[in-house]
Image (spheres, helix red, strand yellow):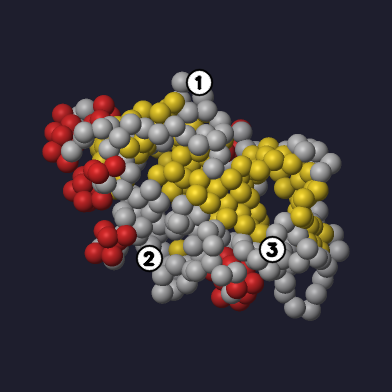
Amino acid sequence: MLSADGVYFITMRTMFLYPLKFKPRFLEKMWGGRKIETVLGKPLPAGKLIGESWELYDFPPGVVDQSATWLSSEVAAGPLAGKTLHELVGQFGNELVGEVPLVGPQGQFPILIKFLDARQDLSVQVHPDRAYAAAHPEAHLKSEAWHIVQADSGARLLKGLAPGVTRQSLQAALAAGTVESLINAVPVKAGDCFYLPSGTVHALGAGILAAEVQTPSDTTFRVFDFNRIDPATGKLRTLHVEQALQCIDFSAGRAAAAPSSGLVSCEYFCIEKRRLERGSRRAIQPGRPIVWMMLDGRATVKTAGYSDSLARGDTVLLPAALKSPAVEAQSDCDWVEVTFPS
C-alpha cells in the first residue's frame, strides 16, 4: 500500500516496528536563526528565530516546561503515526531498545537528539554530573556531543577551562566580566566532533549549525551570558553561578584537545560518521537501536514490510528488532550514526 506521503507499507492486523521518523519540536531562542530550514531543509514557523529542533526526545512529567504529562516525540508516518516514543517503549519494550537500559524509574528513552542553530553565541554553561544530580532531584545528568554540520568562516566554540584555572580565579573573572579569557576557544569546521562530558564549561559559538547527541536531560546552569538583554523581559538573563560552581570539573583544566573527525565513544552513546555512494546498498545489523541524522544526499531505508525515503535533515530511529533492514543510496549520502555501548 502507498500512503499519501509516499511511504510504502504492508497493512497488517497487528502493529509492527519499522524505521521511525518523528515530528520535530522547534524551540524559539534569542540566539537562534534559520539554518535548520536554509541548510537542512526543515520547514520552520515563519518569522521565528529557531535555535533547537528536538528530533528524538522522551521526558517524564514535570521535567521540561513543567509539563503535566510525558513530553515525547510523536511518530510522523506509517502504521504507528501519532504514537509517542514513550508509548512505543511501553508497547514494544526490547523489540525497540534491545538490551539498552532505560533511564530512571519511569523508563525514559536513553537519549536526546537535536539540531542546534547558533546565530549568536550560546551562554557559557555547565551541566550536572552524577554526584550533583543524585543530591539534587530536580537536576539531571547531562553529557553531550556536538557534530558540526556547517560553520561560518571564523566560527569557534568554547570548551573546557584553560590550564591552571581554579574556582577562585573563575569567580574573580566572573566578577570582572572576563570569564571568556579562561576558557579554551576552538576553531571549528564542518565534520568536527566534540565530546562534552558533564562538568565541562562550554559554549556553542555564533555561526555554527550542529547535530547534538546527549543524555536525556534539560538541566543547564549558565555561568556567563555576555551581558545580553533578554528581549522577552528587557533584563539580563538569569545566571546560575553557585550551581555551576558545584558542577564544574576544575581538575580537567588543560589545553583544548583537537576535535575528532566524526567519532565519539563514551559510556552513554557512540557517534560515527557514515557515507554511502550513489547506487550502493548496505545491510543494517539488527539487535540494538540505531539513530541516523542525515547530513546530505538521498537514500531509502527498507525492512520487511516497509520502505521510507531519507533526505538531508531527516532523523530516523531504527528499532532493535527490525527484520532484514538495509539502506540504498539514490545519491552520495552522509549521515551521523548514533549507537549505544554494549
At x 50%, y 20%, the residue is 153
Q: Earlier in the sequence, mark 3 or mark 1?
A: 1
Decide: is 87 above or below 144: below
* Relative image position of residue 17 (x, y in whole percent): 70, 68
- Above or below 196: residue 135: below
Q: Is residue 135 left or right of residue 312?
A: left
Marked residue nearer the N-terminal end (3 or 2):
2
Foreground tag (3 vs 1): 3
Residue located beneath label 1 in the image = 153
Decide: few, some or many residues near mark 1? Use Cα within 10 Å; few <14, some 14-19, many ≥20.
few
Q: Residue at x 26, y 41 (%)?
A: 223
Mark 3: which amino acid? Answer: Pro
Give coordinates of residue 176: x percent, y percent.
16, 29
- Image-based side of 256 in relation to 269, left or right: left
- Asked whether, in this view, residue 311 is left or right of residue 337, the answer is right
Which residue occupies the foreground of this view, 139 or 47? 139
**Rendered location of residue 5, percent (x, y):** 77, 54
Q: Which residue appears farthest toward the top when viewing the image?
A: 153
**Residue 22 visible in the current orientation:** no
Residue found at x 72% / y 74%: 15
Q: CA distance from mark 3 to mark 2?
A: 34 Å
Q: Relative to 228, does residue 272 appear above or below in the rendering?
A: below
Q: Residue at x 44, y 43 (%)?
A: 195
Query: Disc 2 residue type?
Result: Gly
Crowding around mark 2 (Cα neighbors within 10 Å: few <14, some 14 to 19, many 20+) is: few
What distance separates the C-alpha of mark 3 from that of mark 1? 40 Å
Q: Marks 3 and 2: which is nearer the front?
A: 3
Question: Where the C terminus falls, by quadrant?
Answer: bottom right
